[in-house]
Image (spheres, rainbow, N blue to C red):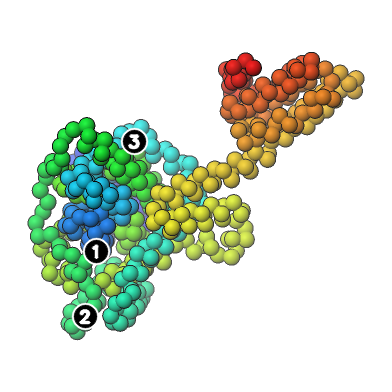
Amino acid sequence: MPGARARQVPSVLSSSALSPAAWLRGSRRPSWLSDPKVLRTEVLAGLVVALALIPEAISFSIIAGVEPAIGLFASFTMAVTIAIVGGRPAMISAATGAVALVIAPLNREHGFGYLVAAVILAGVFQIVLGALGVAKLMRFVPRSVMVGFVNSLAVLIFMAQVPEMTDVPWPVYPLIVAGLALMVFFPKITTVIPAPLVSIVILTVLTVAAGVAVPTVGDKGDLPSALPVPGLPDVPFTVDTLTTVAPYALAMALVGLMESLMTAKLVDEITDTHSSKTRESVGQGVANIVTGFYGGMGGCAMIGQTMINVRVSGARTRLSTFLAGSFLMVLCIVFGPVVSDIPMAALVAVMVMVSVATFDWHSIAPKTLKRMPAGEISVMVITVACVVATHNLAIGVVVGSITAMVIFAKRVAHLAEVTAVTDPDGTTVVYRVTGELFFASSNDLVGRFDYANDPAKVVVDLSAAHIWDASSVAALDAIETKYAQRGKAVEIIGLNEPSARIHKTLSGELTGGH
C-alpha cells in the first residue's frame, strides 16, 4: 500500500541522492540490494509501467508524425538515462504528448532530421537553464496552482482514455469494469504483486483464450524488432538550420522542464521527500541529448506513468525507472507478439484508476470550498480550465500562477493605508503611511494627500511601510512635486534601510528631472 511504503522512503532515497558515479560505485548500498521486498516492488513496478508505456508512446509518435518505433526508442532512452542522471528517484520520463505537439510542425514542414536536431538542441537548452537555476522558479508556484495541476492532470488522463471507449466492440466495456474491479479488490488479498499487473495479465489471458475480438496494443502500430543505433541528425550543419530548429527546441525545453519540475514536486509531496530540481533539470537535458543521438523524438516526465509507478505500484527508487525503460525494449523486441495481444481495455482500466487516484477529491469537497478563499478557488478553476482547453499542462501552470500573482497583488494593495494628523498649532501635518508600497498600491498613494489645504510643512512617516519598487519612489516624488508647486515643504521620515537605499538611488531620476 502507498501509505505503508511511504515509511520506507528515507532509507530508500538516501542512496538516490548520490552522484551517478558514487551510486554506481555502491559506496552506500541502495535499499533494493539489501531488502528483497523493495527489490520485488521496484521490479514489478517497472514492468507495469513498461506495459503502460507502449500504447502511450505509440500514440505520441502518431501525434508527432513519426513511426511508432521512434516514440518507443525515445521512451527507452529517456527512462534509462534519467534513472542515472535525474534528480527525482522513481519519476518516469519518456515520450510525451506535450513534446509531440511542440515538435510535430517541425517534422511536418522540414522532416525527421530537423526533429532530431531540435531534440538535441532542446537538451542543451535544458542543461543551460538548469545550470542557471530555473528550478528555483518553482517556489513561485502557489498551492492552488499545484492543486489545479493535479486535478487537470487527472482529467487529461481520463480524457485520453475516452477514444478507447468509443466506437468499440461491446466486450470492451465489461473488460474495463473487470479490470477496475481487480485493481480495487485484489490488494485486499495481497499487495505482493501490483494489482495493475494482475489485471493486465488476467484480461490478456481471458481475451486470448476466449478469442474475444477487441482492440489490442498491436493495433496501435508495429513494435520495433532491434535496439536503436546512435548517429547524427541528417541535416546540414548551417546557421539556417540552427535558426529553423532553435524556436522549436526552446519551446520543447521550456515545456519539458515545466512538466518535469511540476511532476517532481508532486512526487515529493506524495513520498514526503525532497529531490534536487536543479539536477533534474540538467538530467532532462542530458536524457534528451542521448535520445536525440539515438533517433528518438525526445520527451520529459511522464505524469500518468509516474503515478502508476509511485502511487499505484509503490516504487520509490531509481531502479523502477531504469527497469521501466529496459523492460520496454525487452517486451517490444523479445515478447513483441505477446505484448501485441494485450487488450487496450486492460490498459484503459489502469489509466482510469490512475486518474481517480490522482484527483484531489478533498479540494472540491463542499466543506473545503466553503472555507477556501474565493481567490484560491478561482486560481484552481482557471488552471484546470486552461489545461483542459489547451491539453498543455505548462500553459495552465503559467496562466494559473499569473492569476494568483494578480490576485495577491490586488489583495496586498488594499493593505496600504494613509492617515493624517495635524499639529494643534496648525503649522505641520503628519501623514502616516502603513503597508507595502509597490506598483499596485503606490498608484493610489498620490491621491491620498490634501495638497491645497495642508499647512506649509508636511511630514510623510514611512516607519510602518516598505518601498519595493520604482513605482513607489515615483509616487513619493510626485507627492513632493505637487506640494512644492504650492510652496510647501515635504519631509520623508522613518525609511527602513532597504527602503532608504532604493529611495536614495531612484528619487529624482525617474522623470528626467521634470
Q: Who's the residue at 39% across and 61% down the image?
A: 156
Q: How many marks?
A: 3
Give residue 204's position: percent from left, percent from top: 21, 75
Are dots 2 and 3 in contact, CB under 8 Å?
Answer: no
Q: Which residue is mark 1?
A: 55
Image quadrant in which the C terminus is located: top right
* Nearer-the-camera pick, 90 or 100: 100
Give the mark nearer the N terminus: 1 vs 2: 1
* Nearer-the-camera pick, 160 or 323: 160
Q: Who's the residue at 38% across and 66% down the image?
A: 158
188 to the left or right of 467: left
Specify the amino acid type for callout 3: Leu
Give the mark nearer the N terminus: 2 vs 3: 3
Give residue 391's position: percent from left, percent from top: 39, 56
Q: Which type of secondary structure does the marked residue at label 1 adopt?
A: helix
Specify the amino acid type for callout 2: Ala
Q: Which residue is mark 2?
A: 213
Q: Which type of secondary structure does the marked residue at label 3 adopt?
A: helix
Q: Which residue is mark 3?
A: 129
